[in-house]
C-alpha cells in the first residue's frame, strides 16, 4: 500500500508537470464580487490540456513509471475526463494506454480518447464488472492500473492546480472545490494547509449524490447508487481510501449544489465571463452563491474544474 500523499509530493508533481501542463489563468469578475460582496478568484482548469485538471494527476502518475512499467503500459477505467487524461499523458510519454469505457459512453468521449492514441475497450456496464475486468486485463498484459482518483500520485498531481492559485493570489479565507471521488479535493486541501493554513476548504458535490458529505460527517466511507445529476464528472459512488484519509483530516466540510444551481452558474460563466464550463466544473461557484457560507468581505478561491460539455448538450441545459 503506497503511503499517504503530502505537500512535498505536490511540489514534486509541480516540477514534473512543468512544461507539460498549462498554467491555467486565474480570472475575476466584478459582477460576481458585487453579487457576493466578496473577492472571488476562479482557477480555470477548463482551460487545462484536454479540458480538465485530470491531466495533472494522470501525467504525474505516468511520469513515475519505471522502465518496465513504461514498456508494458497503463490501464484504466473511465467514461469521462480521466480516460482522455490518461490517453494524452501516455501519448506524450510514449507509454501504451488501454482504457475500458462503457459501451454507452458518449461517442465524442470515445473518439477523443482514441484520438489521443488510447486503445479503447468497450464493456457492458450492466453485465460486466469493470474492476474485475480491469484486473484481468492488467494481469494478462502486465499493465499498471492508474485509477481516476484513489492513488497518491494522482492526488499529488491534482493538488498542483491549487498550488498555482495560492502562488498567484496569496492567502485565501475559503476555497471551494468540486468533489467526485476526492482526488482534486484531497490535493487542494494538502496545499491549502501548507500555504494558507487558516483557509477553510470545502468540497462541493451534486445534491443528488451526497455520499461525500455523508462520509465526511459520519467518519466512514458511505457507498451510494450512481446518482442522477447533470454533473457527470462527480457521479461517483464513494470516496477512495486515500482521498478520504486526507479529506477527513484537512477539509472543513462538504456542501452540495442542485442541478438548477449548476445551470445558473454555467450561464453566468458563459454570459459574464465568456467561458465554457461543464456542469461539474460549476459546483464550486454554485455553492459560493447558494451554499449558505458567510462570504461577505472574504477572499474566496473557486476551482472551475473542467470544460468538456458538448455544445448541443450545453444549449439544451441553458434552454431548460
Ligand atoms: C473528475 C472530475 C471532478 C471530480 O474530481 P475527483 O478527483 O474525482 O473528486 C470534478 N470536475 C471535473 C470536471 C472532473 O472531470
Image (cartoon, grey):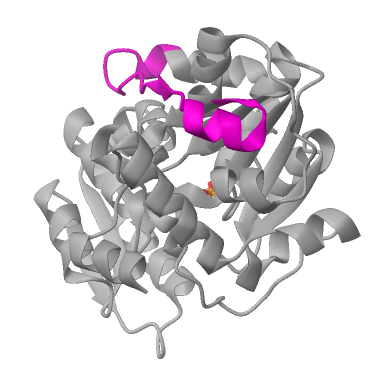
Give the residue furthest to the bottom.
Answer: 127
Q: Is residue 153 visible?
A: no
Looking at the image, residue 31 sits to the left or right of residue 54; the answer is right
Image quarter (top left, top right, bottom left or bottom right) of the N terminus: top right
Q: How many marks?
A: 0
User: What span is in magenta?
Assistant: 15-40
The image quarter containing residue 189 is: top right
Taking depth in this image into account, of 86 and 217 the one nearest to the observer is: 217
Q: Residue at x 63, y 47 (%)?
A: 289
Taking depth in this image into account, of 83 and 227 the one nearest to the observer is: 227
Q: Residue at x 31, y 70 (%)?
A: 319
- Residue 127 painted magenta: no
Residue 275 at what x, y percent from top left?
Answer: 30, 39
The image quarter containing residue 169 is: top right
Depicted 268 relative to depicted 208: above or below: above
Residue 295 at what x, y percent from top left?
Answer: 74, 33
Looking at the image, residue 150 sits to the left or right of residue 277; the answer is right
Q: Residue at x 41, y 27 (%)?
A: 64
Image quarter (top left, top right, bottom left or bottom right) of the C terminus: bottom left
Q: Is residue 213 visible?
A: yes
Residue 307 at what x, y percent from top left?
Answer: 32, 46
Taking depth in this image into account, of 237 and 200 the one nearest to the observer is: 200
- Residue 39 painted magenta: yes
Depicted 254 relative to depicted 298: above or below: below
Amino acid at each position: 500500500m503506497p503511503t499517504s500523499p503530502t505537500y512535498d509530493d505536490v511540489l514534486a508533481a509541480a516540477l514534473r508537470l512543468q512544461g507539460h501542463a498549462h498554467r491555467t489563468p486565474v480570472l475575476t469578475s466584478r459582477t460576481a464580487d458585487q453579487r457576493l460582496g466578496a473577492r472571488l478568484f476562479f482557477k480555470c482548469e477548463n482551460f487545462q490540456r484536454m479540458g480538465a485538471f485530470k491531466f495533472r494527476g494522470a501525467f504525474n502518475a505516468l511520469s513515475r513509471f519505471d522502465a518496465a512499467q513504461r514498456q508494458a503500459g497503463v490501464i484504466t477505467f473511465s467514461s469521462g475526463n480521466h480516460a482522455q487524461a490518461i490517453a494524452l499523458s501516455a501519448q506524450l510519454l510514449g507509454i501504451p494506454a488501454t482504457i475500458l469505457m462503457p459501451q454507452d459512453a458518449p461517442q465524442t468521449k470515445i473518439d477523443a480518447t482514441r484520438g489521443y492514441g488510447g486503445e479503447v475497450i468497450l464493456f457492458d456496464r450492466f453485465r460486466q464488472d469493470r474492476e474485475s475486468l480491469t484486473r484481468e486485463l492488467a494481469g494478462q498484459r502486465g499493465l499498471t492500473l492508474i485509477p481516476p482518483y484513489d492513488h497518491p500520485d494522482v492526488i499529488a498531481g491534482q493538488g498542483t492546480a491549487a498550488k498555482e492559485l495560492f502562488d498567484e493570489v496569496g492567502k485565501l479565507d475559503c476555497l471551494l472545490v468540486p468533489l467526485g471521488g476526492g482526488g482534486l479535493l484531497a490535493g487542494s486541501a494538502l496545499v491549502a494547509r501548507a500555504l494558507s493554513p487558516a483557509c477553510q476548504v470545502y468540497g462541493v458535490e451534486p445534491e443528488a449524490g451526497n455520499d461525500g458529505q455523508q462520509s465526511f460527517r459520519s467518519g466512514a466511507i458511505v457507498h451510494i447508487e450512481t446518482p442522477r445529476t447533470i454533473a457527470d464528472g462527480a457521479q461517483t459512488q464513494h470516496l477512495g481510501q486515500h482521498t478520504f484519509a486526507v479529506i477527513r483530516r484537512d477539509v472543513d466540510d462538504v456542501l452540495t449544489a442542485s442541478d438548477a444551481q449548476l445551470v445558473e452558474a454555467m450561464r453566468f460563466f458563459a454570459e459574464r465571463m465568456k467561458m465554457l464550463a461543464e456542469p461539474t466544473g460549476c459546483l464550486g461557484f454554485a455553492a459560493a452563491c447558494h451554499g449558505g457560507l458567510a462570504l461577505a468581505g472574504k477572499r474566496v478561491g473557486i476551482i472551475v474544474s473542467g470544460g468538456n460539455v458538448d455544445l448541443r448538450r450545453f444549449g439544451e441545459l441553458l434552454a431548460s
